[in-house]
Amino acid sequence: MKILTTIHDLNNLDKLIKVADGFIIGNKMFSKALTKSFDENINEVIKKIKDNEKLVFVLFNGLYTNQEIKLIKEYVKGLDLDLIDGFIGGDLGLIETFKSLNLNHKFVYNPETLLTNYVDFNYFKTDLIKGAFVSKEITLDDIYKIGLKKEYELFLYGHGHMSMFYSKRKIVSLFTDNDLNHNISNLTLKEDTRDELFPIYEDDLGTHVFRGEVLSSLNALDKLNEIADYLIVDTLFQSDEYALDIIPLYKNKVSKDEINKIKQKYNEVWHEGFLFEKSIIKEK
Amino acid sequence: MVELLAPAGNLEKLKYAIYYGADAVFIGGKSFSLRAHASNFTKEDMIKASNFVHEHGKKLYITTNVIPHHADMDGIYEYLKELEEVKVDGIITASPSIIDIALKKTNLEVHISTQQSAMNTNTVNFWHDKGATRVVLARDLTLDEIKDIKNEVKAEIEIFIHGGMCAGYSGRCSLSNHLTNRDANRGGCAHTCRWIYDLVKAQKEKVAEDFTIQSKDLSSLSIIPELIDLKIDSLKIEGRMKSLHYVATVVKTYRMLIDEYLENGFIKDYSFYAKQLEKAENRPSSIGFFKGLPTKDEQLFVSDKTPLRQNFVGIVKSYDKKTTLATIETRNVININDELEIFSPREDDFTFINKEMYDLNDNPITRAYIPKSLIKIKVSEKVYPNDLVRITL
């Protein structure tokens, strides 16, 4: 299982390539929830990653109108396509876009919440995709069942603040009349009966709400190593230093003490999402 | 001809949707359908629904729009074969596993649910190429963007025109899962976007305490002519959990507006239709994305404290020409001297003051307060079974 991560500062790439197998990068025009937007220099970044023999995936994780699909197509044409290992996208309309650019077997479908069983996961085989992300809201048992029957590469979010909500609406700006000068790290939602603060922020694609506590898949590693091809360590709301600390936990068997030291260092509460607790439909 | 598609949470609501002008109705069965809190239909009820709808020359669609986990998948084939036996006109669905079985192993027509958030031509064509007949577009598109799609696709296009909206992209939200453990994509949505939150800056400074991320409901009277001109195939009203009165009121309002536009090519007075909609139990509403990215007017930033109108008070069961007494099945309290409105599928609604009211033994009464009891009311004009009675507010 390869570990992919995100980047905050290109100057840290030399250190990050020592722990990560690859990187997910994007441009804020087309990607949400980025740690950093790589704009004019994206081909430089791609080349630098590939010069270090690491994998590079470009992110298109929004949902797009026709006009935006056209812009993406033009944008992709300008990328150094031979060097890119994959394009991660959440909009099915992108499959046709990448096919039309002869980029078969490069698209990785990530609808975040929709691929919850092996039939749905494998449905896109004839569409010549490279792989797909399993849903973030299913159990390890369900992920494992998908993995045993997968017909292309299996990706999953393994560590980081889980995205819970994505709206095209600019909800915070509308509410605050733009007077809070909010940025990516300083606004949260607090619900009366819960202690957890949920980060909320806007970018070019809309409004996003995340878990305040951090998803950890460390207790699922044995099974994930058997069936997953890529595990993502997303460092949104953190730093490159965080990736340097976290990725080795997934690469090497480490003691609980070492894990606790890292949690304390970053003052984080970790949870295991739905890996070991199945969601319900309604209370009986 | 554009289809007016109405929701129904049970057989009675389905009948009223048809009586009041729907061309098609969508319902949920007991399996594989979101809205776990709606009544939902047994197979027996679905057969009755299918027979009723088809006898009236209308159509019936069944929602099978869950995103199933492995444990939910047992019985999909058998359930879809049941729907085939019921002779439904299509299923509204989102999961590829259900889509695949329906297309390969049944003769069911497949409509792609808005849970798939189709936002562009490519996505619509993707599903059409897989065999889907119709795609319900995401509710996050402007009229121009819808036009752009409609002009380039072969699949039928269905658009939401009225009712509740997800604040985020439908199908992609897991707020409910994370905050309540209830799975939104399997019918358990706890509407956590409608909760009240504090907005906190820098982990400690409370900058607001009545923040919500919810949107107003959708209401698109003024948009209907443009949607008809775009040749949108189906105009959908949301609300399988809404009341019979809501369904009847909203369906009739859009029915009249569509018919006026088709007949005359213009709408004389939108305010008439807006007033009709006000009589239903609507939450605050807006035109959503139709005219562009929502502004503050389309958001609902404070808790909706407007009391729901409970103005629906009864259903006409029969009418006696000689005595001009209508027998009414009550649904809410009716008092003597209330101003009542007879609300019918026809165009002859009227109001009158309730001056004479009796129990079934013809004893005069001044107040009817037991729900679903039968009473008689003297009416000023002829009424018909299935006309609705409401108090004018």
Image (cartoon, rainbow, N blue to C red):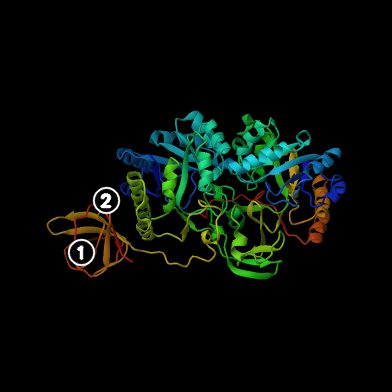
- Tell me which amino acid carries mark 1: Asp
**Residue B359 image label:** 1
Whole-percent x, y for residue B225 in the image: 41, 47
Chain letter of disc 2 in the image: B
Residue sitting nearer the eye, B390 or A117: B390
The amino acid type of the residue labelled 2 equals Arg
Can you see residue A21?
no
Residue B170 at x, y percent in the picture: 55, 49
Instruction: Report the front residue among B354 and B84.
Output: B354
Badge 1 marks a residue whose secondary structure is loop
Which is nearer the eye, B56 or A171? A171
Q: Same chain, marks 2 and 1?
A: yes
Indicate which label's residue lies in the foreground, 2 or 1: 2
Task: Please state, as top left, top right, bottom left or bottom right, where the C terminus of chain B lies in the image.
Answer: bottom left
The numbered disc on residue B4 is none
- Residue B373, relative to residue B16: is it above or below? below
In this rendering, position of residue B318 left or right of residue A183: left
- Give the position of the N terminus of chain B as an image quadrant: top left
Look at the picture and state if A58 lies above or below B345.
Answer: above
Q: Is residue A82 left or right of residue B301?
A: right
Q: Quadrant of residue B331?
A: bottom left
Q: Crowdedness of circle 1 by 10 Å Cα count: few (<14), some, many (20+)?
A: some
Q: Which residue is mark 2?
A: B346
- N-terminal of the two: label 2 or label 1? 2
x%, y% of residue A98? 66, 34
Q: Is residue B41 left or right of residue A173?
A: left
The quarter of the picture where residue A1 lies is top right
**Residue B167 appears in which quarter of the rendering?**
bottom right
Q: Secondary structure at mark 2?
A: loop
Chain ID for label 1? B
